[in-house]
Image (cartoon, rainbow, N blue to C red):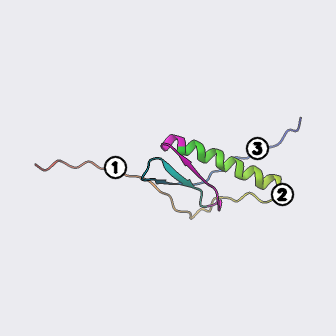
């Protein structure tokens, strides 16, 4: 059994709601790494799987593993509550 050192990698993902439902997910630091999920949690799970497979292919091919740039944009949703005007 080969014992490999493990390193964690963190990547930002971009989720786009689709009109027919679900989310398309892209990983800006990994060109071509795109997936889809039926809901938010499923989309994140699919993103983890897509990133894992992407990085495994790079490692198998002897390619460097891209790091997330410090200046990459971060998407977030902010919810506010306003009083209802009658």
Q: Whole-Å distance between the Cαs marked 2 and 1?
A: 44 Å
In the shown orientation, is residue 64 left or right of residue 71? right
Query: Are the two marked residues, 1 and 3, in contact with CB atoms closer than 8 angstroms?
Result: no
For label 2, the SS is loop
Tell me which segment is drawn in magenta.
Answer: 29-42
- Which of discs 2 and 3 lies nearer the camera? The answer is 2
Label drawn at residue 6: 3
Q: Badge 3: how crowded within 10 Å, few (<14), some, or many (20+)?
A: few
Query: Which is nearer the eye, 69 or 18?
Result: 18
Q: Quick check: is 11 in the magenta stretch?
A: no
Q: Whole-Å distance between the Cαs marked 1 and 3?
A: 37 Å
Q: Badge 2: how crowded within 10 Å, few (<14), some, or many (20+)?
A: few
Query: Which is nearer the eye, 8 or 52?
Result: 52
Instruction: Residue 24 in the image: state x and y as whole percent.
Output: 52, 53
> How many circles with numbers are drawn on the protein?
3
Q: Badge 1: how crowded within 10 Å, few (<14), some, or many (20+)?
A: few
In the shown orientation, is residue 12 left or right of residue 8? left
For label 1, the SS is loop
Task: Tell me which label, 1 or 3, sits earlier in the chain.
Answer: 3
**In which quadrant will I find the N terminus?**
top right
Q: Quadrant location of residue 30?
A: bottom right
Task: Tell me which label, 2 or 1, sits earlier in the chain.
Answer: 2
Quick one: which residue is furthest to the top in this view? 1
Q: Is residue 19 among what the camera can see? A: yes
| Residue at the spot of label 1 | 79
| Residue at the spot of label 2 | 62
Residue drawn at the location 55% of the way across and 45% of the way down: 44
Residue drawn at the location 34% of the way across and 49% of the way down: 79
């Amino acid at each position: 059994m080969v014992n490999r050192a493990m390193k964690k990698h963190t990547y930002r993902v971009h989720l786009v709601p689709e009109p027919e439902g679900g989310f398309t997910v892209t990983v800006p630091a990994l060109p071509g790494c795109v997936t889809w999920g039926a809901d938010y949690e499923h989309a994140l799970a699919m993103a983890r799987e897509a990133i894992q497979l992407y990085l495994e292919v790079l490692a198998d091919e002897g390619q460097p593993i891209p790091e997330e740039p410090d200046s990459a944009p971060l998407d977030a949703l902010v919810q506010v509550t306003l009083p209802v005007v009658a």
